[in-house]
Image (tube, coloured by chain):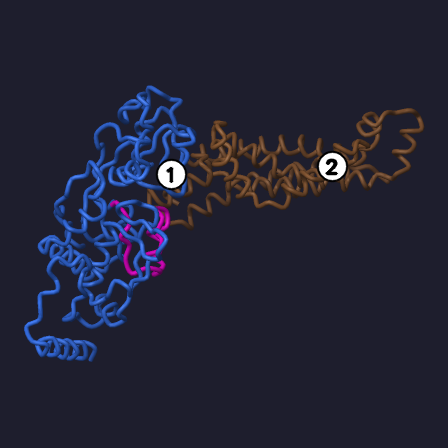
Amino acid sequence: MRLIRSAALAGAVALALSACGGGEDIEAEAPEPVAAEEAEFEAGSTMAELSEAGEMTIGTKFDQPGFGLRGLDETPDGFDVRIAQYIAAQLGIEADKIKWVESPSSQREDLIVNGDVDMVVATYTINDKRKERITFAGPYYVAGQQIMVKKDDSTISGPEDLKANPDVKICSVTGSTPAENIREYLASPDQLVTFEVYDDCVTQLENGQVQAVTTDNVILVGYVAENEGKFKLVGEQFTEEPYGIGIEKGDTAFCEFINESLEKAAEEGYYEEAWKETAGAYEGTEVPELPELEPCA
Amino acid sequence: MEFLTEHFDDFVNGFFRSLSIALWGAVGSLLLGTLLAVFRVSPIPVLQGFGAAYVTLVRNTPLTVLLFGMAFGVPGLGINASFYLFGVVTLILYTAAFVCEAIRSGIATVPIGQAEAARAIGLTFGQSLGLVILPQAMRSVVPPVGSVIIAMIKNSAVVGAAGVGSDLFSVYKRMTSALGYAPLPVLTAVAVAFLIMTLSTGALLALAERRMAVAR
């Protein structure tokens, strides 16, 4: 029934469009993803449900420049947000029909498991432990962890220097992957300071309470750009963090749909465009290619 | 409960970290609280005013506001210290206001004749308070001060949100988020760890109450 109805609707829309008579190609160079009108999905699937509802709830960060940052207006913006908007558009959902939910690192799995959001696009590193509770689509980007220090600081030039300077405190987000990764470079666990959000870490770096902040490079680049002349990145990327899109565990069809959407975004040039307008706007970043997608299991 | 076997060391470390926060918090707030109570009953108006103002201000401010004011505001003034120290100091400052009021209520239970008799035999204010009033007052304040200390131990969990790493709160966050264990078993273990602290405090208090009891 549902399938038939949406197919009929799609037909009507197609008719209406062709009736307008050879209109211009509105998709060319459009910064906003255009909602797919001929969306047609198997009844009962997540895609059909969302498509029918015409709206969805997406979790993202509200405090990460370049990926998900919410300013004075209600809608956040960034690479994660653009990717999420593109996927929503593939479901026929307009950008203004998306409800954004703030998803701090420590709450992402719970938001998905509890059904509070339909998906999470929030600088979300794919790992096996998380896969026990949720399913990842993607990855859509591979970040790497780096260290940010004050511009005039020369004690730390990479993670290896942390053991030699046990007085140095390094800050990251409570329960995040970067906080976990940095542990092996520390002389004692007391060197690690954790807060709920990166903004707090940056404030404490300014305050001199911590001497370094560590997380994925792209996030740090955002802070370097935002606080011009105050901070710098040091050392090489010392991890590979594939960012995935978190969805309900076992929803393979939705995962495959997202992966197809990502490939489509890359083909259409939307991926590159979105990057350049968001995270890529900051100095020192390179335009990434869509990484090889993991099979949906 | 697999996290307990896989990360037992971290959990035990977290327990001792939280325990040390609670212990220093208890020692500090009992000392400061007693001092504040002495201020409030002293014959010197400036000290009375200070004690009253302190209690009014601190007791009516949320602990988290004080905590973040300490962890973010104080370094902004150019004063740097470890977040552990900031956390413990905040707990002491906050809890002392409640300890002060509990002790003051205890002082009020000592009949006024005791103070008058002490003064009549020529004891100074310090002597009459230290030798006559407080020893009697302390007996009746064990239960209310005990409640304050137990509440403080539970409040100490908040300190982990303000930069103090590796306490039970941080361990919980790390286990459930970075390492991906389900929250409920980890929270249960954290609750048990706090119960160990609070129940043993309760047992100590019961002991103290029995020891100090006098037939009236």
Q: Is residue B55 above or below residue A235?
A: below
Question: Tag 2's secondary structure?
Answer: helix
Q: Is residue A270 left or right of residue B76?
A: left
Say which residue label 2 marks.
Answer: B49
Image location of residue B82, percent across then percent down: 47, 28
Residue closest to the eye, A38 or A66: A66
Query: Which contiguous range is marked in magenta?
Result: A101-125
User: What residue type is disc 1 on?
Assistant: Thr
> Tag 1's secondary structure?
helix
User: Marks 2 and 1: same chain?
Assistant: yes
Residue at point 34% right, 46% down?
A63
Q: Nearer the viewer, residue A223 or B129?
A: A223
Q: Colour of chain A?
A: blue
Q: Colour of chain B?
A: brown
- Would you call the spot at circle 1 few (<14 residues within 10 Å), some (14-19), or many (20 or more)? few
> Is residue B152 at all visible to an observer of this figure?
yes
Magenta residue check for A104: yes
Q: Residue furthest right?
A: B120
- Give the left or right position of residue B184, taking residue B127 as reference: left
- Pointer 1 residue: B5
Above or below, A20 relative to B45: below
Q: Amino acid at mark 2?
A: Gly
Q: Quadrant of residue A23?
A: bottom left
Indicate the quadrant containing the N terminus of chain A: top left, top right, bottom left or bottom right: bottom left
